[in-house]
Amino acid sequence: MSQQIPRSELAEWCYLQGKAKAMQHTHLRDLAHDQARNQALTFRAGPMLLDISKQKLDTSIFNGLMRLAEVVNLPQAIQDLVGGAVVNNTEARPALHSALRLPRSEQLVLNGQDIVPAVHESLERMRSVVSRIHSRQWRGFSGRAITDVVNIGVGGSDLGPFMACQALNEFVPEEASRLQVHFVSSIDGTQVSDLLGTLRPETTLFIISSKSFTTIDTLSNAHTAMQWMLKARADKALILAHHFIGISTQPQKMSAWGIPENNQILFWEWVGGRFSLWSGIGLPIALKVGMANFEAMLAGAHFMDKEFSDKPLAQNLPVLLGLVGVWNATFLDIRAHSVLPYDGRLKFFPSYLSQLEMESNGKSVDKQGFSLDYATCPVLWGEVGPNAQHAFYQLLHQGTQAVSCDFIAPIKRYTGQVYSAEAQKSLQSQHQLALANCLAQSRVLMLGDASTDSDANTPNFKRYRGNQPSSTLLLDELSPYTLGALVALYEHKVFVMSVIWDINPFDQWGVELGKKIADKMTLALAGQKDVVFDASTMHLLDIISKANQEVSS
Amino acid sequence: MRLCVHGDTLFAWVSAAKLAETGNQVLMRVSGINNSFDPTREPNLSFLLDEQQQAKRLLIESLADEMPTDVHLHLIAIDLAIDDVKVLMADIIKQVDDTKPLLFIVMSALPIGSLDQLQEHAEQAMSMHTHKQSVSVVGLPLFCREGSALTDYSKPINLLICGENGSPAITQTLELMRPFVRQASHIMIVPHTTGELIKMGVNAMLATRISFINEMASLAEKLGVDIELVREGLAADPRIGADYLHAGCGFGGPSFAEGLLSYAKTLRQEIDTSGLIDAVLAINESQREILFRKVWRFFQGSLAGKKIAIWGAAFKAGTASLENSVVHPLLQGLWAQGCITQVFDPLASEALYLQYGANPLLHIAQSAYEATEQADALVLVTAWDEFWSPDFELLKKNLKQAVVFDGRNMYEPDFMAEQGFRYFAIGRGESV
């Protein structure tokens, strides 16, 4: 990585810049009817189909992107990633989420040690916990079986498991049908206070998920949970033994908090928080959908890992999705990206991705520490497509922002028996409606007015500019396996973009300072006098402290 | 009369034995699978069956054997779902080769509405048949209790016959049951669905009384009140009475809970609610683990390696059956925590061995006292007579700690305390 040419000075980079300039004068509708182009820009990997023919690119750009990927050594970078090289340079460690998906038969040697056995040992511990809870033999202090599990975690310890639990709700096996899994994350206590009002301490189990086991958000929620438990039964050792599980890379810190060794599930420093749902952090998923389905998710992700590491760049789904992302954000200067699943089960996929992408690639220095002179990660947001049509699609169609989109939909849905045959039929036709809307929206975004019969007399407020690029990702159906593959696809897409941009996607220094200042601010709110902040902060502190004094007096 | 009994449930065996005893020619067709009832489990039943076979009034064949062609009275007492009963009926109808009317007497516990469905089905099957004689379905739900089934059969409290009053089918059924009709306290002839609802209602009411007293027992325990005194007070009121009002570790037994689940389902389907029965079932489910919970609490959740003696495993005294017994949740709970269990049951040891023999945490004791050797506590599951007055001195000597959890409220708390036992029962004794 030393003494390399900055990305923006590479000939391949400049070539693409030129192409981008030319492309500004091309409307997507001019590319829309080329069937050979569509064929060339549609790709399949297992249960997944990716259509990037609604993107603003042609063969020369596609080839240019491939050349750029080659020249920045993307193939080597991929092998480095999955092989356990130190790809996280600022924290000097590998990022081996793909190792969490390796089958038991594989090997991966890290610092002279095969890590696959440890991964499967941890899975075994998960399996044992899941089996005890599902068989209703994990008992609370009163001897009653646990009926509610509350996952306390934030960021990667929350978003991934929460997203997957929502997505796979229909895969709950019989033995888990009476178990409720809840999520608590926010530091303000909103969720935890809502939840504690509805649960019974004797049948509630808390999972404290924190990679560092120092996250104040999580520990403050855990503290509240503990106080609530102690009110029901004032025997801390008993409560800790039967009502708290810890998941972390830090066994000493878990022990210091009081989590008994038997209730600790470990993972490793080489698992990034936002990539950790495949580790012990995924326990809520396994509790919700069963160990077999959790393992199907791992298998789906492993399938994508193999695609990523083995397929040539030009047929490699994560590479293609990543290069398209860079093309849009950096070369076409599209600063916003929207993820639009046409399946309500993926409601929380966009918010999961907003962490995965923006925390990974929201960076502005390269791996050598130099400032970048090009745009990196776009603002990413999204919502269930059909609902978003009634919310922010207005801006996509007629606003002034260029926005790229990912449309995601399963082809088949409601194939299993649901309620009555009539209801099932009706649900299937609802799914057809969703698919129709999915295809309609991406078409209108591409073509604008050209998709309809507007003419010169159509007033401007009814006009559609079109020319908003999008990718369409079709899954054969949504299952634990395809969800695993989908998540891994985006994980690797993020990595591809980071390699092109020459940034480290595995650190998050940008979230550290706020935590430090919050500590000082907490002291100031508690009444510490000798602190000095800016005028605005001092004024706000003053207002709050006066209001508090009035309450207490 | 010549008749054929299909199935090998308790009702099938008892019907075959009693109907042969009263002079009928009975062919019994047994499945040997599907929750077969072992007749040795029921007092005197095997003896009566042997006797009737020797007298040549009872012949036992298999369901796989050829269907008789010359029998026109069929007792369906098989433990099958309604669709399988339909298949069986169609097979019988196919075999009939003359024009005498055909009568099906259905004893199987089926969901509400089944008898009408079966009648319709039988008529349909017959209409496809060349002979087209009349066919009738009559329901004869039995109220026999395991352990006293033969007596209950001979002297029914309520002989409930479900069919069209005055029809030849009812006349024939009454004729078949004539020896027992005169000993019946009450006879009712009611339409199909009415009879089904009565049968369900009886079960549901009894279950409700049990869950009711069990809920009171939990409260009594918390308040330091002896539930046995409360029970006595309730039972003294003639509007309430004493039956099915004993606090314990929940109801079990074959098909009792199953019938209730089916009843709850019918309620949900028909009137969109099952609030009361759901509550009854939920209390029962919780009650079935109450012994485990008491043990758990006593040992503060640290049960690994503890040795627990268990007296009784059968779902009630007098039977060798483990079906739906509270011993299952107790054993599974204890094993999951790594407890060693030493179980003694005078009749159910074999059933226990067949079901759990392979589990290294199960030791089946040859005597009540052997079970208690070096045990950390004794748990009483079944109210066998021999447990009423044990040698408490020996018990204390055998146990590592003198602790008794009594799921059947067999002992007096004060007496047990005097003897130096920590004594925990259902709604009485120490609270834990």
Image (cartoon, rainbow, N blue to C red):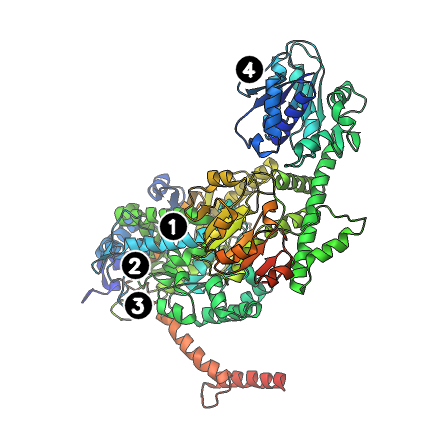
Q: Amino acid at mark 2?
A: Gln
Location of residue A66 in the rendering, given as x and y in whole percent from the top left corner = 26, 51
Badges 4 and 3, same chain: no
Mark 2 vs mark 1: which is more N-terminal? 2
Vertical placement of residue A230 versus A482, above or below: below
Residue behind mark 1 = A55
The alpha-carbon separation of the residues under discs 3 and 2 comes to 13 Å
Query: Mark 2, residues whose alpha carbon is within 10 Å: few (<14), some, or many (≥20)?
Result: some
Residue behind mark 3 = A373
The alpha-carbon separation of the residues under discs 2 and 1 comes to 16 Å
Give the quadrant of the N terminus of chain B: top right
Give the quadrant of the C terminus of chain B: bottom right
Badges 2 and 1, same chain: yes
Q: Amino acid at mark 3?
A: Asp
Residue behind mark 4 = B66
Looking at the image, do the residues carrying marks 4 and 3 touch, with CB atoms under 8 Å apart?
no
